[in-house]
Image (tube, rainbow, N blue to C red):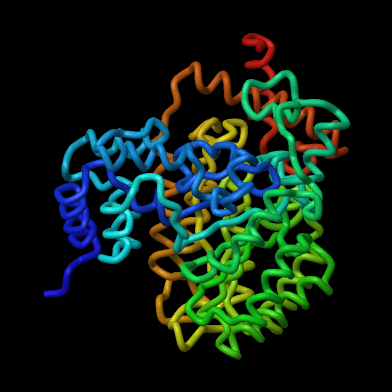
Amino acid sequence: MSESETDRIKRIRDYIDTNATPTFCLAKWHHVTMYLQSGETHSCYHPQPHKIPLAELKDNPSALHNTMHKKLERKEMLEGKKPEGCQYCWNIEAMGPDYISDRHIRNASIFTEERYEQTAKGAWDQNINPEYLEINFGNECNFKCGYCHPKYSTRFYKEIEDFGPVENVKNHRCDVDWMKLFQREEENPYVDAFWEWWPELRKTLNIMRVTGGEPTLHKSTWTLLDKIDEEPMPWLELNINSNLGTKNILIERLANKVKKLVDEKKIRAFKLFTSMDTWGERAEYIRTGLELELWEKNFHTYVQKSESPITFMITFNIFSVTSFKSLLEKFLEWRKQYGWDEERKQHIIRFDTPYLREPIQYDMNILPKEEFMPYMYESLKFMEDNLDDTRADAFSTIEYEKFKRVVDYMAETVYDEEKLIEGRRDFYNWFNELDDRRENDLLTVFPEMMDFYRLCQQVNLTNPL
């Protein structure tokens, strides 16, 4: 009988915990996310990013990943101690041996004898070239999605510079005074250090994901694609996140470049990720800067010219609840048009439905359940009525199950009164302020939220910040 994925994770967990230490995590050595626009890094999304000291880069460009901060955390792990930033995993593991933490999953996903020996048996202060890299070259972006942050969007940054932070909310004020952003790639020492490190870094990378900002607006994205074209990396899976909202010529350029790299086997695989949370003017309200007519033109240009799949990362939020079915209908329309990836036995048009929890004013769980759960059940029923793992123009079982988890999460999650007050007060103040700044009107776009809006208004009056 073949080993299940869960059994494999537990087997590697037991091996590492016994032969290394019960706090050892390969991700601290072999995974890295780098925010070059702000000079920050971390190796996992649970610990907060920390600053990369420019002094450490002077003679060691790999300090973009191998900071002294991170090396000291590695030292703690090698000694069986628990770095403070990894508390999320320590909490899960404290629940008992049947619980699998992200540390266990990360270890199993990238475990090889060579990596294990290099890290667990090596010096704590050695420099390591990672196998997985996620990189932000800059924060230039043509969108200013409200649940994003000025750190990742120049348009949002400019808005906060012009109007100041949103003062009357507890969550997501978006202060920028503490940020020192190198918004011009040409003048960013962190970008310079990356290209200095690149000749060595490229040798160990298996997966590289370019995020932003909007990568098609970053000079470094195109430099990267040209470098790979000139010096192929046939072992590499390359991923790019794009909002698909830039000029059509840029999306056509990206599609042609990707197709060339894949067809000529200069990379192992390519994946494009984009975002959409609902459809129509409601989508444009959520993702300020989105022009659906241009977006849909870019979407078709990319799929047709690249001849490669595209994955939607749906940030399921408070505004997705009442109109998610409209986006599901578009998925079926696009799937009927583009069909099936026969080689991989997957849809050309793919999507995932992670839900948003922060900032709380975008959290679906501040909505009254009785009024809004019927919308969720309607969307789930639509998926159920169009469920077929063998048809290109249908939903898969795994997509249905993933969304069902979102529905169940909303149905079962009950916030205490204090958290509801906080969320609803911030909802009222945040969107009133954003509507003024962006010349929008929430209730014109979402008229079914009138009663909820009035509830939030009353909460704000009786429980001011």
Query: Which of the two residues, 414 or 252, is positioned nearer the viewer here?
Result: 252
Point out the image quarter for the C terminus: top right
* Image x and y of residue 164, in percent: 82, 26
Among the 4 quarters of the image, the one containing residue 331: bottom right
Point out the image quarter for the N terminus: bottom left
Task: Specify whether residue 327 is in view.
Answer: no
Residue that protrudes farthest toward the front in the picture: 59
Query: Which of the two residues, 349 or 50, is positioned nearer the viewer here?
Result: 50
In the image, residue 83 sits, relative to residue 2, either above or below, namely above
* Image x and y of residue 346, in percent: 46, 78
Query: Which of the two residues, 75 or 25, is positioned nearer the viewer here?
Result: 75
Residue at the (73%, 63%) spot, across then down: 220
- In the displayed structure image, the side of residue 90 where residue 150 appears, left or right: right
Residue at the (60%, 89%) spot, across then down: 263
* Image x and y of residue 67, in percent: 51, 43
* Image x and y of residue 288, in percent: 78, 47
Residue at the (75%, 26%) spot, across then down: 177
